[in-house]
Amino acid sequence: MRRVAPIASVLSVLILGGCLFGSPSASPSPTFSPSPAVSVAPSASVAPPTPTLAPTPGPDAIPTFIAGSKVSTNAAGLRVRSRPGTSQGVLASLPTGAKLVVELGPVRVDNYGWYLVHDADAAAPAYTEGWVAAGFMPNPYLVPANFDLPVNPIVAGFAHEGNGEFGPVPVADANYAVRWVASALPGKSGCSFSVDLVPGTGTAVPAIRATIGKAPAPGNLYGDFFAAHPTLKGDLFVRVTSDCSWALTFLRNLPAS
């Protein structure tokens, strides 16, 4: 009888044969050439755009009101300050629509135009007078207003930067006063402010001689000045020699009621 080798033995032979004599030839594995390296240029560094700041409006954009004008606030929270300037003490904060009377200005301080205003509103807050910034056109902080004003003692007012002659101002007697303020122009460390009052027929009378530092300076001429110069009656002209931003107002001294 023919004997058949166990399957395990046959497998052992085949395996051993393969180890001793080499593996049977096989189709070579395909060879893949590496993909050529792609040189990618780094993206250029793009700087973020620099924000463009809007320039501060010039003096021509400051709203103009003559002394004695009736105005109201056009923005909530407008601060009333003790003197012109953003660093001056705050006297009150006004709501929109607050009624004011312009007494003096504008004078330019911290690039804003400032007006001395009188409280003409019965509503709070209560204060007598103070300085407010007028803002810039076309969205000013102050706008013209129309309301009843029983008494207005202001006779005339002028404001300018530099020299000039203004008038006439009618002065009947010594019962007048002059209020003024002067400030060095932006970028300047000081200025000078000189005022002569000139009668229509007569000699000029020196009225104000002031040297102004960095801070704005206010001043007054009272009735005794006019009493001491009786020629200052009739139509007076105001002659200013100055390199300041300045404002000046004539007021009639009203008798106490």
Image (cartoon, rainbow, N blue to C red):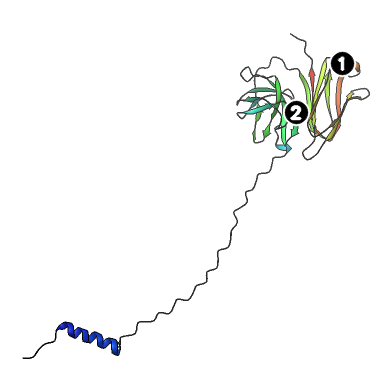
> Residue sitting at 25 percent across and 88 percent down?
17
Furthest residue toward right = 203
Which quadrant, please, contains the N terminus?
bottom left
Between label 1 and label 2, give the one nearer the viewer: 1
> Residue sitting at 87 percent across and 18 percent down?
225
Furthest residue toward top = 257
Residue 190 appears in the rendering: yes
Per the image, label 2 sits on a secondary structure element best described as strand
The disc at residue 177 is none
In this rendered view, identify the residue nearer to me: 45 or 118.
45
> Percent position (x, y) of residue 76?
60, 28
The disc at residue 224 is 1
Left or right of 146? Residue 154 is: right
Residue 163 appears in the rendering: no
In this rendered view, identify the residue nearer to me: 18 or 50.
18
Per the image, label 1 sits on a secondary structure element best described as helix
Report the amino acid beneath label 1.
Answer: Asp
> Residue sitting at 67 percent across and 33 percent down?
135
Q: Determine whether 10 is above or below 225 in the image.
A: below
Q: Of callouts 1 and 2, which one flags the residue occurring earlier in the amino acid sequence?
A: 2
Report the amino acid beneath label 2.
Answer: Gly
Does the CB distance between marks 1 and 2 fall below 8 Å?
A: no
Left or right of 177? Residue 35 is: left
> Residue sitting at 72 percent across and 39 percent down?
58
Q: Determine whether 54 is above or below 238 in the image.
A: below
Neighbours of disc 2 within 10 Å: few (<14), some (14-19), many (20+) = many
> Percent position (x, y) of residue 80?
68, 26
The disc at residue 105 is 2
Q: How many marks?
A: 2
- Quarter location, residue 110: top right
- Quarter location, residue 91: top right
Q: CA distance from mark 1 to mark 2?
A: 24 Å
